[in-house]
Image (tube, rainbow, N blue to C red):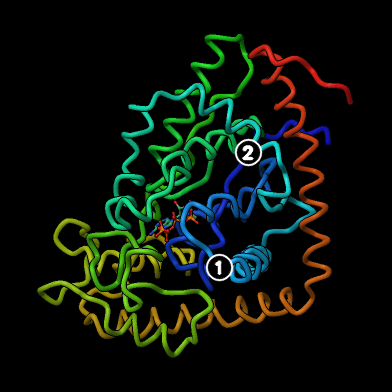
Amino acid sequence: MANDRPRVLSGIQPTSGSFHMGNYLGAVRQWVALQETHDAFYMVVDLHALTLPQDPRELRANTRLAAAQLLATGLDPERCTLFVQSHVPEHAQLSWVMECMTGFGEASRMTQFKDKSSRHGADRTSVGLFTYPILQVADILLYQADQVPVGEDQRQHIELTRNIAERFNGRYGETFTVPEPYILRETAKIFDLQDPTVKMSKSSSSPKGIIDLLDDPKASAKKIKSAVTDTGSEIRFDPEQKPGVSNLLTILATLTDVTVAEVEQKYAGKGYGALKTDLAEVVSEWAAPFSARTREYLDDPETLDSLLAEGAEKARSVAAETLAQAYDKVGLLPGKH
Ligand code: AQP
């Protein structure tokens, strides 16, 4: 496909029964917008999911579920390339080359690995969890992505990708595009409703701290109404002094497409209760059609699978070319085709 638009690539793990508000506002919402202006590649990163133990049936179901949710948010296979990571074997193949380009100390500095390995303990920490950022390096470089739309928690991995791309280019000659992170300041980090000093996260937040997009709207409303707010009663965007209220303001402003300043103004002189009630309503209005669309895609797995197969074919045509170049640059003898 001849395309002179800048290229973006990103992925999401199929590791839960629903995306959460952090995934959506931090990343997926930008993916939908970027498919209009960029040559966009988005994938369900099932290989990354294997870094922690998965029930095979659940993983398969969650992979389809993740794809269905991506389509339900508005990704359009006519406007972007949507695929499943394991359907494009070049990811694992380039990853090996990238592992050999990465220092052990460099990989050991990844904070997500340190967090997750300390949470899971040595017995449940796989080598895959350690090398996962390097697979991510391969994911990005295979597509010569210019930008990578992600949440703040991924910034360090994009930095690693840049370093390795520059190292490879320096050693073997210009091969890879050095990508930039695409992280929107306002929604870079959506916080846990119960502890608004830490990110909303499927593996570390308590169920009450997470707004799951496929949750029953009543359950989400209850969580929003019991969100931890701050001392005082003034509704003001102040992430230092008022992290709880600021988080709710960010979510409300983004979902209603207005600025945080406008929301602040609207609630001047009102109490936290009014803000929470309105946010619960906005989330429910957003989530109901989203859930219905997700179900429609899931109810037709054949169509879903064939969309993903077409996406994988498009992705492979790009990935295979980059892999061949990289193999050649490092001196691997070409095989017979
Ligand atoms: N709280 C968040 N705020 C903003 N962006 C977020 N993302 C995740 N949480 C937030 C972004 O969502 C994209 C897909 O995430 P992922 O599938 O790679 O999962 P993750 O980053 O591992 O998400 P979790 O919930 O935090 O999972 P665990 O607990 O397993 O680590 C990414 O772009 C991510 O930045």
Foreground tag (1 vs 2): 1
Residue 207, percent from left and from top? 35, 77
Which residue corresponds to the image point at 80% horizontal and 36% vertical from the top-left?
317
Q: Nearer the viewer, residue 184 or 297?
A: 297
Q: Which mark is residue 92?
A: 2
Q: Is residue 51 left or right of residue 288?
A: left
| Disc 1 and disc 2 in contact, CB within 8 angstroms | no
The answer to which of marks 1 and 2 sits earlier in the sequence is 1
Question: Callout 1 environment at 10 Å: few (<14), some (14 to 19), or many (20+)?
Answer: few
- The CA distance from mark 1 to mark 2 is 21 Å
Q: In which quarter of the view is residue 95 placed?
A: top right
Amino acid on which disc 1 is placed: Asp
Q: Is residue 211 left or right of residue 28?
A: left
* Relative height, residue 1 to residue 256 (above, below): above
Secondary structure beneath dot 2 equals: helix
Question: Where is ligand 1, by quadrant?
Answer: bottom left
Secondary structure beneath dot 1 equals: loop
Q: Nearer the viewer, residue 20 or 101?
A: 101
In the rendered view of the protein, which quadrant contains the N terminus? top right
Residue 178, percent from left and from top? 54, 25
Amino acid on which disc 2 is placed: Ala
Q: In which quarter of the view is residue 171 placed?
A: top right
* Relative height, residue 237 to residue 133 (above, below): below
Residue 194, percent from left and from top? 25, 73
* Relative height, residue 77 to residue 170 (above, below): below
Which residue corresponds to the image point at 36% horizontal and 60% vertical from the top-left?
190
Which residue corresponds to the image point at 60% horizontal and 55% vertical from the top-left?
46
Q: Which mark is residue 55?
A: 1
Question: Looking at this rendering, what residue extends furthest in the front direction?
Answer: 123
